[in-house]
Amino acid sequence: MKKRVKKHLPNAITCANLFSGCIGIVFAFQDNLIVAAYAIFLSSIFDFFDGLASRVLNSYSFIGKDLDSLADMVSFGVLPSVIIYELFLKAHQIDNVSHFLNFAAFLIPVFSALRLAKFNNDTRQSDSFIGLPTPANAILIASLPLIMQQYEDLANYILNPYVLTVLVLVMCALLVSEIPLMSLKFKNRDFNKNIFRYLLLLFSAILILFFKFVAVPVVIFIYITLSLIQFKFTNDKVPG
């Protein structure tokens, strides 16, 4: 019984990630973007704990790795793209352009798929990331409807087709970029070796405490910045 739990628990958590993502897609297409956004956050929690469970239980498997990518594709690729698509529909429509421009939202799952395939086959990403992880991209997108709910004045800026288009293009570029980014996996408690991780957690906690969801895009920017600073101090080129 214990062996079965040890073997299947990480995959069960991954399936919960996928289930949450599917439910989020339903709510997103029903224009309930708040629930859809929370579904992404819930999937992110499951995504964190399936990896943790796999490491703690030492139950790594190729099936689990593939299942994780398939779940992430739905929860962090398709679901955020539907949220962006619904935001496009709410935005000011540009005559003879928006009909096609709105579909730019679905570049997100395309580049998310490329990102996940790259991650699964890139040996350089065992201890760090190259390119923005799909959960980070999805969390940023999930924050948009929550920011609009929190600060109505910002809705006019977010619901701008040009802003949304630039956001999609920038995030897609980051997903498949060669930018080295730190992993949040703590292999030990050595402060000097984890100083940038601790700084990220500290800044994130403070910003979210005071500014709530509007802090999420800032946290992602800080994550990228600290990663680049950390990498500059440890190496001068992309790993491998």
Image (cartoon, rainbow, N blue to C red):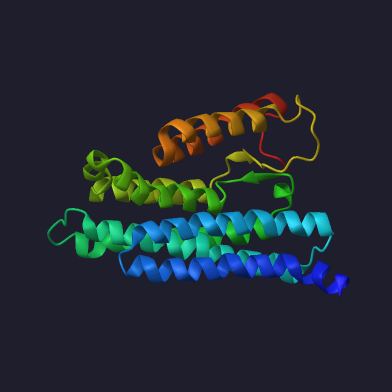
Point out residue 55 in the picture as x, y percentages from the top left corner: 79, 55
Q: Quarter holding the N terminus?
A: bottom right
Above/below status of 18 relative to 120: below
Above/below status of 23 relative to 39: below
Which quadrant holds residue 61? bottom right
Inspect this view and state whether residue 176 appears. Answer: no
Q: Is residue 56 left or right of residue 85?
A: right
Point out residue 18 in the picture as x, y percentages from the top left corner: 56, 68
Point out residue 27 in the picture as x, y percentages from the top left corner: 38, 68
Residue drawn 57% across the image and 55% down it: 44
Which quadrant holds residue 118? bottom right
Q: Is residue 12 left or right of residue 137?
A: right
In the rendered image, the residue lying farthest to the left is 95
Inspect this view and state whether residue 18 appears. Answer: yes
Residue drawn 24% across the image and 51% down it: 161
Point out residue 134 in the picture as x, y percentages from the top left corner: 54, 54
Residue drawn 68% across the image and 24% down it: 233
Q: How many marks?
A: 0
Q: Quarter holding the C terminus?
A: top right
State the residue in front, 217 or 182. 217
